[in-house]
Amino acid sequence: MDMEASKKKLGLKERYNHLTRGLGWETTYQPMEKVFPYTRYEGIKIHDWDKWEDPFRLTMDAYWKYQGEKEKKLYAIIDAFAQNNGHLGVSDARYINTLKLFIQGVSPLEYMAHRGFAHVGRQFDGVSARIACQMQSVDELRHAQTQMHTVSNYNKYYNGMHSWRHWHDRVWYLSVPKSFFDDAMSAGPFEFVVAISFAFEYVLTNLLFVPFMSGAAYNGDMATVTFGFSAQSDESRHMTLGLEIIKFILEQDPGNVPIVQRWLDKWFWRGYKVLTLVSMMMDYMLPKKVMSWKEAWEIYGEQNGGALFNDLARYGIRKPKGWEQASIEKDHLSHQAWSTFYNYGAAALFHTWTPTDGEKDWLSAKYPDTFDKLYRPRFEHWEQQAKEGKRFYNGTLPMLCTTCQIPMFFTEPTDPTKICYRESDYKGDKYHFCSDHCKDIFDYEPEKYVQSWLPVHQIYQGNCFNPGVDPTVPGFDPLRAVLDYYHTNFGRDNFDFEGSEDQKNFARWHGDDAGGA
Amino acid sequence: MAYRLTIEPLGETVEVDDGQTILDAALRKGIYLPHACCHGLCATCKIDVLEGEVDHGDASSFALMDFERDEGKTLACCATLQSDVVISAEVEADPDAQSIPVLDFVGKVSRLETLTPTIKGVFIELEQPLHFQAGQYVNLAIPGEHFARPFSLANAPGGSSIELNVRIVPGGAGTGYVHNRLQVGDTVRLSGPYGRFFVRKSAQLPTIFMAGGSGLSSPRSMIHELLKERCAQPITLVYGQRTKDELYYHEEFLALAQQNPTFTYVPALSHEPQDSGWSGFRGFVHQAAQAHFNGDFRGHKAYLCGPPLMIDACITTLMQGRLFERDIYTEKFISSADAQQARSPLFKNV
């Protein structure tokens, strides 16, 4: 006899049901809608929370075991990296600037995700949805923490990473990711999970993580690769949560479909705009390139996202409104973004540079229709100016789009030589937008977006100087005063990579410095 | 040499022969593991190896990625044992699933019937009774071929006589054998039963069967069984072919509908000549269902069987009529070509 029935264990589903359904109850001292006050005003109708199918069934004991194991592995590698002077092993000190962008712009979002999921993890009426969100909340805290720890080793040797948390709430370009998340956090719980779990974690996450993590791998940064893998093993859980959320909401009531469609239109566009920073990272900031932004968009956006929206069509959901425009822009996005940062390099907290000849050729090959025609001449012009000792720095700051808070540098979808301006009037004031879709988002909820804290506006209104600064004294340098308010190490965190302390140190550590130090 | 395989969370242990896959060993002991393509492409059968060593075999590097191998995942349909092994699989007790061990059968062809210009009915007398659930299939060994071919059982369960309905596939080795070489009196070998396509009777809900092309076998078996058991719930068969001469078993279903007030038969023809005198529905199966149910499928269980395009259209129609994945069942035969299709992971079963 080769078949024995040993003691029958509880199945995963049963165990998980004990953890979720088994721990919930219908409240009696207070009505449910008072205990869960946020789940009704968005118009989403949920008839039966029991129809929620747990997207993953990880019990708490298993969760701690897995996560503990991941931490052990990760910190062993971080230690080894530090002991072996891993900061010297990267391809080129320019690479470090992608890490600056990551710790300034992305890691704070992990922390905000932790807070956001803790919030909805309290607010959903359904226990299973609450538990899934609570687990993700713990994950996100872990991600923020492991990223800080990984990058802290680089912070000992390179500039531009020392006050990232302070910067995230103040610096002009960091308001792009910050306002994205604040927008989601200040929405209702259903909009939050559609925005973050589905539109961001599911539809767009590959366009954020794959470029950073592959970029790290290509450029010799094994510590970052490891926290990436460690985080990504949680990511699959977050993605399945995103899928279950969208299915659950769409199946519960036909009236939910148009609400979700509007959120997808909005959050696809909001997320895609944040990825502008990733596009320039891929095409300009990585010394060793992984793939172009255009290629990444074609694979992860057009192909994978296309398959997803074909399936969603069964629910009556169509592709987000901005989808076609994102595909038109794939030939332009990174070039326009990097040009802008090159311009404002004095006010950015990472270094900028013009691409090398080899890099320009790579860009020509990847962007045959646009780079040579529209963007190469611009970079060659700046290169020539820099050679003549006149490196161009724009001494002012750009106007920001009221919705996405990105400088208004995007061009018309039909004409790449003309800047795209849109505006709306609301209660006697004029608001400016970079695109039709950002304008649409504002027009639907103007009361929300008139409250946007636009860093450039705030600077010009005099709200971004240290206490006691007097802008009326003769010779006052407003840019310098703003950078002081930012806690910038002026001359070390900003300006061109050429001549930077990072560049000199990296050369000296590698014994390449002819003059010695 | 043989190793022992323990399957969690059931806690059941089976012997696995040298070179035998985990999936084959489990199925042969009546333990259902989720699976679909059976050759390492679709990843439906992904399991966790908790203890012991396995060889991943021919698992595709897309279906089982490197990091998953590192995490101790494997594909049951390709994995063989290198030691005693404990696995954990997503097996849930389905109240309607019977654990029927897969066995090998030998039989003789008792009758061959031309059902339509392209479909043959093959009637086989087995040497021993084949116990199966209506909707399941067998793998028929094709002489001279390395692989067996799956065919759904078209008769209601019970006894040792079985019926297969086989549509000729141009250039197909298996169906070519059945259509061109198979003779009454021939000995055939098959194994079964396989498949997770069966009626969820415990749900106690009205059923809709949607069948097209050569996909009638399973629904026919299921309907015969339900009617035999005097099922109290309404049963509707929406059955489509291109033309009237392809509409096999039409008379049989007309008669069943006459005799059984709970059974409704909705035939549909998509390419019937306008002047043929056909008074039934003209159009595709999903359109016929949409019209018959007035676009509202709530409160049903739906069972779909037929060509991929038909299945896809039917699922879309059902979902637009607010019947979702948990109430839709299909039998999928995955070929290498299907695995390349760009689908998102939004749906698991449909």
Image: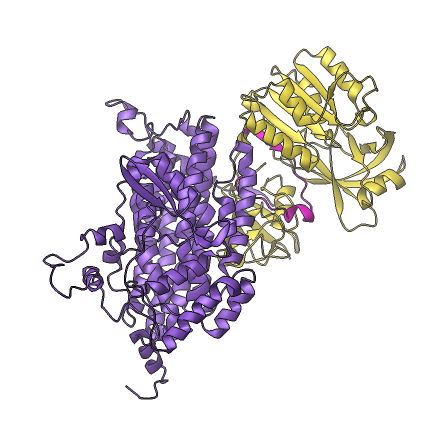
Chain colours: A purple, B yellow
In the image, is residue A56 above or below residue A90?
A: above
What residue appears at the point 25 percent right and 50 percent down from the top-left corner? A457
The percent position of residue B260, horizontal first and vertical second, equals 70, 12
Q: Is residue B257 left or right of residue A345?
A: right
Q: Is residue A380 left or right of residue B179?
A: left
Can see residue B158? no
Q: Is residue B150 left or right of residue A52?
A: right
Predominant secondary structure, magenta span: loop
What residue appears at the point 80 percent right and 50 percent down from the top-left corner? B145
Magenta segment includes A202 = no
The percent position of residue A12, horizontal first and vertical second, equals 45, 40
In the image, is residue A151 above or below residue A443?
A: below
The image quarter containing residue A450 is top left
Query: What residue span does the magenta drawing correspond to?
Result: B327-347
Q: How many numbered discs, if any?
A: 0
User: Which quadrant does the N terminus of chain A fall into?
Assistant: top right
User: Which quadrant does the C terminus of chain A fall into?
Assistant: bottom left
The percent position of residue B210, horizontal first and vertical second, equals 67, 26
Q: Residue furthest bottom?
A: A515
Magenta segment includes B345 = yes
Q: Nearer the viewer, residue A2 or B307?
A: B307
Q: Is residue A487 left or right of residue A239?
A: left
Q: Nearer the viewer, residue A248 or A388?
A: A388
The percent position of residue B37, horizontal first and vertical second, equals 65, 45
Q: Residue furthest left?
A: A468
The image quarter containing residue B113 is top right
In the image, is residue A164 above or below residue A327?
A: below
